[in-house]
DNA sequence: AATGAATGAGTGTTCATTCAT
DNA sequence: TATGAATGAACACTCATTCAT
């Protein structure tokens, strides 16, 4: 009782350590999985790089798969920042948005680590919605303001688009959709947003 | 005498079956490894897709690694054809060549399946020399004829360049070379061929 | 019909080749199995050393096991010759016989290759009877003539003793019989032959 | 404070279990490998006999080979005890030592399990030094005291002799050294220790 | 009869995951 | 909660044996 103050402090420490461990694990997993691929990365190697015991990982992630998905989320964030950088000089938000979608679609169908996780489609789509949403939704809104798109609910658009991207990636990987058609898929997704297909077709690759 | 004809036919059958099996195995391995990555692909799955017994694979390839390298060779050929297609409208052979090198370097440092095999550097370099050589050497010669390059021995140039590409990829993956510097590496390789660095720098990414 | 003469000659050649192959195979198997043990020896290695195809071995021996037993027979013969040599200066045939049995028992319980084949007890006992019989039976007869043994049927004695040796070896290997008791087993076997146990006990190890 | 006692107890339990498992594994491996040979013994069978899971073995031994070497060390110890027993009535320490070396050399060149591990020469020599050293060095010292040998450093002598024994065994197995020459090898080793070759030649086999 | 390619059962080994401490 | 030893399922690879030629 008298120690409650201390306990709070202790909990704070515990919570801090938990966060630190979780971040260290994701960071370690990012490093190892990016270098060797998900399969070749071993949980023990990741644990050691994160400086925790082998069993500790499972206090933070239910399985290797869950950890891989956490890593993928980080990769999504990094991808968003990279897109941000590459489009920093582009004024037209519609273009930025189109470029972003094309980039994500490209990553999802070419990067093995993404591909291997696509079977968890709902989880991936949700991660996409959460981690790239802040950027994508901002661009949609700007494009709407600029009269390039026409939608009352940017959030909903991005939520649907997230799922559509995952679905498209799955189709492409399954070979049901030629890689060459990718570009058109991007366009169709954009069309949902009300921009003319022709214009989109002309813009997207121009970046 | 009459049996000699039969023998030829018999040998033909055996040889034909061996070729068919080998091709079926490479094809199956291509499919599975491209989809799941080298590690996640199992030899049994590949064997079944190729319609041979589990042990038969080892009559054709000493190890999973050797099979993966055979697959990589196929990927090199496919990449050459793809580059061919993407540069079909480009007249300047020097540009085509530069684009090709940039593309290969990109694949070698981004495609996980390539990356995981780079430790077999000499083998990879040799495969690169053999499988992409016909295209690369042709381009070098054309560029020489057009006065863009200056070298008496296109074959030797490509042989050296093959090793240089692998070495550069290794350095990049090891983090000793920033990914951003890749482009400059391409240029340096081209410089071996006598074309001015400035011009190359301007051309390569323009395609 | 008119070719019967030729056929005989042909068969002769064929038979000769068969014998040559069989001997080459046993010889090769002896070499390899003695060096590496039965398990570590591969049928392919043996075939190559005998200069025949991999499948050919099975035209001469039903299985690796059968080949190993043929090898064991050779080892038995060699052992007999070796005993012969080591006892060349011993006059007392009973001593020679006792030494021989002790030597065989020792080999059967210490040499891994023998031990591993003991489970084929009947076959081994028969081989022992056939391959060491000429020597053993001769010694028994000599010992009878010298009044050291008393039996009307040396052949039968050796036949029974062969089985007894195998049985004793099995028991010793199974741990049901201490290795220290081996000597006494030898004696009991000898007792079957009518020689006084005491005398035998005194003689056997003295060589 | 009160937990420190518990901790000690806990560590003790873990450590105890680890020791028990290790010993159980070696014991099980001894049994199975002695009976069937190293190759025919399967890791699963050993694990089951030791009452642990299949994978657990690899927490204690890096490979089947390492386990086999641990077994060989036990066999060395047993051999030392056996030599001890067989020479219990011999007073001359030099004779005991000579007999011991001859016995080891014999085992190393006749016992298949030893032979198959000789390629790990350095490891085997080291094991020989450690496991038979206490006995051998004691005999050397006694022999020195009795004026039979003359060396200031028995430990060093045994260390060198260990390597020499392994080297001799390798040569004998390779056929570079006739088995008949073994005895002389023993003598030469003994000569390193200062005892006259003639005397040694007369003593060693006399036991 | 001889060959050597095909086969698949069996083995050593790895590693994600669990669990006692 | 953190740890690391224990576990067993899964996989690469070997090799005795079969069989088409």
Image (cartoon, coloured by chain):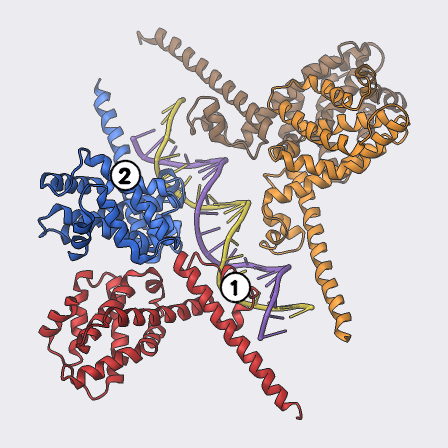
Chain colours: A brown, B orange, C red, D blue, E purple, F yellow
Answer with left or right where residue E4 lies relative to residue C193: right
Q: Name the residue located 44 percent from the left edge and 68 percent from the top edge.
A: C67
Q: Local crowd at mark 2 within 10 Å, few (<14), some, or many (≥20)?
A: some
Q: Nearer the viewer, residue E13 or C197?
A: C197
Q: Which residue is mark 2?
A: D160
Residue C198 vertical position relative to residue D153 in the rendered view, above or below: below
Residue D204 percent location from the top left of the image: 18, 53
Q: Nearer the viewer, residue C70 or D71?
A: C70
Image quadrant for the C terminus of chain D?
bottom left
Q: Local crowd at mark 1 within 10 Å, few (<14), some, or many (≥20)?
A: many
Q: Tell me, yes or no, whether dots 2 and 1 are on the same chain.
A: no
Residue A157 at least partly seen = no
Chain letter for mark 1, please: C
Q: Name the residue located 32 percent from the left edge and 63 percent from the top edge.
A: C115
State the mark number for residue B125: none
Image quadrant for the N terminus of chain D?
top left
Chain letter for mark 2, please: D
Q: Residue furthest bottom?
A: C1
Residue C112 vertical position relative to residue B183 in the rendered view, above or below: below
Tag 1, which secondary structure? helix
| Location of residue C143 (image quadrant) | bottom left
Answer with left or right where residue E3 lies relative to residue A53: right
Residue C126 percent location from the top left of the image: 34, 77
The CA distance from mark 2 to mark 1 is 41 Å
Q: Which residue is mark 1?
A: C47
Residue B151 percent location from the top left of the image: 82, 27
| Location of residue B150 (image quadrant) | top right
């Amino acid at each position: 009782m008298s120690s409650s103050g201390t306990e709070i402090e202790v909990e704070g420490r515990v919570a801090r350590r938990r966060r630190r461990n979780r971040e260290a694990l994701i960071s370690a997993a990012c490093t190892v999985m990016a270098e060797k691929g998900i399969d070749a990365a071993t949980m023990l190697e990741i644990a050691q790089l994160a400086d925790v015991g082998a069993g500790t990982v499972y206090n933070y992630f239910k399985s290797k798969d869950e950890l891989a998905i956490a890593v993928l989320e980080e990769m999504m964030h990094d991808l968003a920042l990279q897109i941000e950088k590459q489009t920093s000089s582009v004024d037209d938000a519609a273009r930025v948005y189109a470029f972003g979608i094309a980039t994500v679609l490209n990553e999802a169908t070419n990067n093995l680590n993404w591909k291997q996780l696509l079977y968890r489609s709902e989880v991936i789509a949700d991660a996409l919605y959460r981690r790239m949403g802040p950027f994508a939704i901002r661009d949609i809104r700007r494009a709407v303001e600029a009269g390039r798109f026409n939608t009352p609910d940017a959030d909903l658009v991005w939520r649907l688009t997230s799922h559509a991207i995952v679905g498209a990636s799955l189709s492409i990987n399954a070979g049901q959709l030629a890689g060459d058609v990718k570009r058109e898929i991007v366009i169709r997704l954009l069309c949902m947003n009300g921009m003319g297909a022709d214009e989109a077709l002309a813009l997207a690759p121009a970046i």
